[in-house]
Image (cartoon, rainbow, N blue to C red):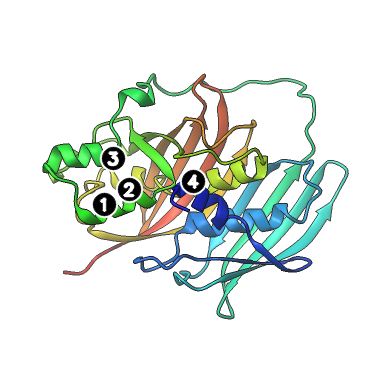
Amino acid sequence: MTNPAERLVDLLDLERIEVDIFRGRSPEESLQRVFGGQVAGQALVAAGRTTDGDRPVHSLHAYFLRPGRPGVPIVYQVERVRDGRSFTTRRVTAVQQGRTIFNLTASFHRPEEAGFEHQLPPARIVPDPEELPTVAEEVREHLGVLPEALERMARRQPFDIRYVDRLRWTKDEVRDADPRSAVWMRAVGPLGDDPLVHTCALTYASDMTLLDAVRIPVEPLWGPRGFDMASLDHAMWFHRPFRADEWFLYDQESPIATGGRGLARGRIYDRSGQLLVSVVQEGLFRRLEG
């Protein structure tokens, strides 16, 4: 498999080792910890595999408890909390080498006719994704060359990401910047037609850039990091059907950062401006020594 989108679908295809127990691969990466979006996406797959499949995910709430080790399989244990007439609830515990690293509770809702509908429109009008450069193009333009590490990352990246606002490269540029960020995203290839795969793929993507909004007033996003950061918890509400291999706008903001933690909120829209998903995440930020 050379297509990163195919590799993502394969990564989300868990092995069932018991009725409610699944095993997920964790690729060997040069990272200190397993990417949080991977664990959340796989845990949601495990939850969905224990339902009838006729009820889409409508929300998830998760806690990152310990860093996962790259290259070591992760076991997902599912508890069937509730099977009601309208809602199904599942609790998932992710275990690696005998230690719990992640907890997720997911709720599934039988589709219903809406008694009423409303939504706030997107906060601003943004360029279409085709008008924006890729991250690799912006870095190459700024540095004159694409670093080998970033080139390798771009080849493995399952999502095309395009920042709405130009990247900032110096401390002066980030000083007094609003804690906001927006990106267009889509999978780099087709993801098939299973709605659960698209939901889990977008869950994976939702952890990729959300904490950018916390960092923007502090340091350049693509320069050397002055802080170690890690996701603490993650919540999502899925409002409408979508495909993660079609362009979606991820509008992100950070209302507060204090006490070593930063809170970020995200709203995901389709190209017509319909709100698809709402996201909230808190991250831990610790200044690096030296």
Q: Nearer the viewer, residue 7 or 247?
A: 7
> Mark 2 to mark 3: distance in Å?
9 Å
Q: Amino acid at mark 4?
A: Ala
In percent of width and height, residue 158 lies at 44, 47
Q: Nearer the viewer, residue 148 or 279?
A: 148
Tell me if label 3 and label 4 are in contact, CB under 8 Å: no
What's the amino acid at mark 3?
Val
Q: In whole angstroms, how far apart are the C-alphas of marks 3 and 4? A: 18 Å
Q: Are marks 4 and 2 in contact (CB under 8 Å)?
A: no
Q: Which residue is mark 4?
A: 5
The reply to whether residue 261 is in sight is: yes
Instruction: Name the image quarter holding residue 58.
Output: top right
Whether residues under marks 3 and 1 lie with C-beta atoms below 8 angstroms apart, the answer is yes
Q: Nearer the viewer, residue 216 or 83?
A: 83
| Residue 91 vertical placement versus 124 (above, below) | below
Distance of label 1 from label 2 (alpha carbons): 6 Å
Residue positioned 11% across, 41% down in the render: 144
Instruction: Kindly state the secondary structure of the residue where label 2 is placed.
Output: helix
Determine which residue is flagged by label 1: 150
- Is 26 on the left or on the right of 197, as rendered? left
Q: Picture coordinates of residue 113 (x, y %)?
A: 79, 25
Q: Residue furthest right?
A: 85
Vertical position of residue 48 compared to residue 185: above or below: below
Residue beneath label 2, please? 154
